[in-house]
Every structure is written in C-alpha cells, then in structure tokens.
C-alpha cells in the first residue's frame, strides 16, 4: 500500500511539472520552467524512495534533492520579483 501511495504522489508531482512546462512553452517565462524542474525533481525523488529498499525520507541524499527542488522554487520567486532593469 505504501508503494502505491508513493507512486501516486510521484505521478502527481510529474503532472504538476507538465502543467508548468506547458505554461513555459506558451510564455517562455523562466518562472514556469523553474517550477516544472522543481516538480520533476520531486517526482524523481519519490520514485527513488519507492524503489530503493530501506530508503527513508531522512536520508541525506533524498533530503538534499528536496532542498534543491525547493531552492529552485525560491529562485523562481526571487527572479520574478526582482526589480526590472
């Protein structure tokens, strides 16, 4: 049951990434690209958590991927809100 839920969460992250990627293709705004990449990293993280035996969310490798994903979101927000040139 746990693997099925992990897979469903991974698919959710993947679909959210595709959603933002579609907006990036229409607008070419990097904000949407950073969000899409972040969600795809999260999806890959969930797939790895579900497939590697004995893996836990507190493992530094998985936690580091999550930090990178959320860092991309912060980067997107920062770039979108910085003053214009």
Image (spheres, helix red, strand yellow):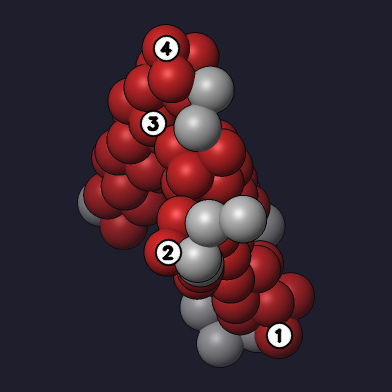
Quick one: label 3, few (<14), some, or many (20+) residues within 10 Å?
some
Q: Looking at the image, which is closer to me, 81 or 17?
A: 81
> What crowding class fits label 4: few (fewer than 14 Cα within 10 Å), some (14-19), or many (20 or more)?
few
Q: Secondary structure at mark 3?
A: helix
Please tell me which of labels 2 and 3 falls first in the chain.
3
Among all residues in the image, which is located at the extreme top? 26
Q: Residue at x 38, y 31 (%)?
A: 20
Looking at the picture, how far across and down is residue 6, in whole percent? 36, 51
- 2 or 4: tag closer to the N-terminus: 4
Instruction: Find disc 1 in the rendering and name its residue.
Output: 60
Query: Which residue is at the far front?
Result: 85
Q: Nearer the viewer, residue 37 or 10?
A: 37
Location of residue 13 in the rendering, given as x and y in whole percent from the top left corner: 38, 42
Q: Please name the residue shown 42% across and 12% down the image.
A: 26
The residue indicated by pointer 4 is 26
Labels 2 and 3 touching (C-beta < 8 A): no
- Which residue is identified by label 3? 20
- Mark nearer the N terminus (4 vs 1): 4
**Mark 3 or mark 4, earlier in chain:** 3
- Measured along the vertical axis of the image, is residue 26 above or below residue 45? above
**How far apart in space, not on screen, are marks 2 and 3 (Cα)?**
18 Å
């Amino acid at each position: 049951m746990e693997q099925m839920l992990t897979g469903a969460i991974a698919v959710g992250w993947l679909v959210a990434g595709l959603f933002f990627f579609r907006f990036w293709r229409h607008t070419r705004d990097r904000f949407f690209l950073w969000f899409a990449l972040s969600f795809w990293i999260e999806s890959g993280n969930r797939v790895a958590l579900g497939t590697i035996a004995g893996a836990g969310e507190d493992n530094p490798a998985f936690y580091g991927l999550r930090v990178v994903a959320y860092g991309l979101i912060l980067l997107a927000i920062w770039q979108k809100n910085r003053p214009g040139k």
